[in-house]
Image: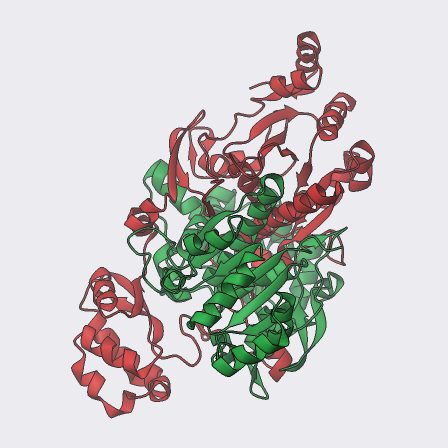
Chain colours: A green, B red
Amino acid sequence: MKILEGLTVIDFTQAYSGPFCTMNLGDFGARVIKIERAGVGDQSREWTPFKDGNSGYYAAINRNKEGMSLDINTEEGKEIALRMIANADVVVENFKVGTLDKMGLGYEDVKKVNPEIIYASISGFGQTGPLKDLAAYDNVIQAMSGIMEMTGFPDGVPTKIGPAIGDNFTGLTMALAITMAYYHKLGTGKGQRLDVAMMDTLFAILESPILFKTLLGEDLSRVGNCDVTLTPYDVYPCKDGYFSAGLAGESGWDRFCKAIEMPELEKDPRFIDNDTRCKNYAILTPIMTEFFLTKTRAELADIFTAAKIPNSPVSTIPELMEHPQIAAREMLVPMVDPGVGEYLAINNPMKLSVTPASLDKPAPLMGQDTEAILESFGYNAEEIKQFAANGAI
Amino acid sequence: MKPLDGIKVVDFTQAHAGSLATMILADFGAEVIKIERAGVGDMARYWVPMKGDDSAYYTYLNRGKKSISLNAASPEGKEILVKLIKDADVLCENFKLGSMERMGLTYEEVKEINPTIIYASLNGFGQTGPMKNTIGLDLQLQAMSGLMDRTGFPDGAPTKAGPAMGDQLSGTYMAMAINLALVHKRKTGEGQRIDISILDSLFSILEAAPMTYCLTGEVPERVGNSYLGISPYDALEAKDGYVAVGISTDRQWGKFCTALGMDEIGADERYKTNELRGIHYETGLKDKIEAVTKTMSKFDIEAKLRDARLAGAAVYTVADAMASDQIKEREMLQTVTDKALGEVTMPGTVIKMSETPGGYTEGAPLLGENTTEYLTQIGYSAEEIAALVEKKIIELA
């Protein structure tokens, strides 16, 4: 049995944040009905990488969903959407704020046909506040939230976190919100409106720089790969790439010095304790880097693991795809997609013993399930033919 | 009313990731009873920023929770835990693998005490696999997960995401997994085991890179602040900082040049199309644009871009973001009175629910603040409590 079996989600989302959210619901058994605009489709269908004209980007985040092509700009399309919503539990959307209201599919409209609906809106800045109407790109939100300011090297430019975390973190947070709202609905029968913003999500994960400001009035900025309160704790260039090693506190400095074959550093007054080492970070780092440059990542991993010091090579993507821990955790699952063919899908990281996630089906081709979905909502073959003729589906 | 009202969590988590998960549960109404080591407490109680002996970091992650301070290694301490667990819905822990076993509180053992428990574990590499016993700090997990490989400039070092992304993300996954398990329990009465790893969590957000490797056999280099196929998409230098822009169509390019008074660059045939701009970006175009942006302040540029309805924003310092009206109106900073720190302002609750809003109205518990309360609840008399204090089995605030 799957946890979310019986939960029907009408999914108007596109691009990355919304589809990542509904993917997490689909993985646990929710029936996710993805509505794409007839003739156009989710914009991520145009995003790289491609195979045979099909987007791998789209395929990766739309597994476990049913695909329906519907034009909600037509009166007939809107009526169909409302009838489906009347028989659903959740609506998820990540349009520009107000778009669905204009189409007659806003929360107030939807509540009339389904008072218990859980109506979930993901947006750049939220449904309220002076910036609510602005569209947002991930880099804009990373810039405005303070994340870019805090990422990168002090003598370099502010740096974007590579993956679009404004999208995936926000999508996950909404999936959590929907699950909580569903839990509440099971207890009370009541639905509600959910509002999760990319800006709020990234701002909230800044953690201690906010506290330094409010508690002590101190402004922090980016520090590269180190931690101002811990030394050694850094990423060092080595013979074949980069390697991270670090201590979580005072303990282990003696072992660290032996590991890097510089026992004389242990009693050096410039590096005698963590605080002193933090002050002399700029002196100590080049000395230690000498050692790292003479070794490969594999050699370093052996050395530091034997010394019981937290360490890791900086892995590349191809290395991860072969990584024994990733394999043992079944984090990659072979899948055959009707568009891009065979690939390794990234499994859901939430491991539940009784009701695990399962990757049952690949992403839908555009409009693939339109007929079957309409039938399941009680439309007959005649009506469906008419919708198609009218261009609603 | 909050969605998790009535849910009782016995919380063995400490440090960051696990405490974040139970913070979210507490924000939404769960009763989170934190079990801390007598005399020491959660290691986050020692994390900066500190005011005197008290950590704001701890307060941020543990707002709205209760604290019991006890010695779990003693038989008496164990007995207290067993009584608490009997009556709980959820047990959370983020120890190194094996710690719960030493306490005699593995999932199998806890199931004997409470057959419908939801038992949630979180650690660096998970409860299974060849690295399950390895300790990883956030830095190592960012390094191993591929996140660092994807972050930074192609000619520079792989770069750590500033915030502890591994902790924040895995804690959020754990909170969601617990809610999923609560749904299942409400429907069937059945509990279960949850296993979250920071490595898995970070691996799940690498976006297109793993798929690109599957389909093409290779992965492009990290791209700094740019995005393949869109130009300019970058952080540009301003007089007083940086501005992030994303110009994805040729029409937007025209508007961009007009907005910043770059008519000459806008008219230049070499930069007419997105493709051409991509070709010339690093070999001249970027310098030309920055020659203009460097003369203006970052917020001026942001205003001009916004007026032109273009995607762009200043790179905000943390103080800038905190001062923004959007953050204020979204109540993303909340001030409460903490028993240790006094008035303290912390990040607010991200998830906005119309009927069952979350949030918090108090700070974190003092170490052992609720020991007496809970021991009384599970049947200990005042004399017994005094005797346990005497024997240093428990500690009161």
Name of the residue lying farthest toward the bottom: B269
Judge from the rendering whether residue A226 lies leftward or rightward of residue B307; answer left or right.
Answer: right
Q: Tell me residue A113's x, y (percent).
A: 50, 54
B260 or A207, nearer to the observer: B260
Pick whichever, B91 or A173, lies toward us: A173
Query: Percent from the top left, x then y, of residue A63?
Result: 63, 69
Residue B292 percent location from the top left of the image = 20, 74
Residue A18 at least partly seen: yes
Left or right: A385, with B309 as reference point: right
- Identify whether B217 is placed above or below B2: below
Q: Position of residue A281 (x, y in %)?
A: 45, 52
- Left or right: residue B302 versus residue A359 is left
Q: Residue at x 59, y 18 (%)?
A: B396
Query: Which corner quadrant of the image does residue A319 belong to?
Result: bottom right
Closer to the camera in the image, B388 or B379: B379
In the picture shown, does residue A90 fall above or below B257? above
B335, above or below A43, in the image? above
- Which residue is depicted at the point 29% across and 51% down? B320
Q: Is residue B4 above or below residue A52?
A: above
Residue A233 makes an appearance in the image? no
Q: Residue at (23%, 60%) from the top-left corner?
A: B299
Quadrant where the N terminus of chain A is found in the figure: bottom right
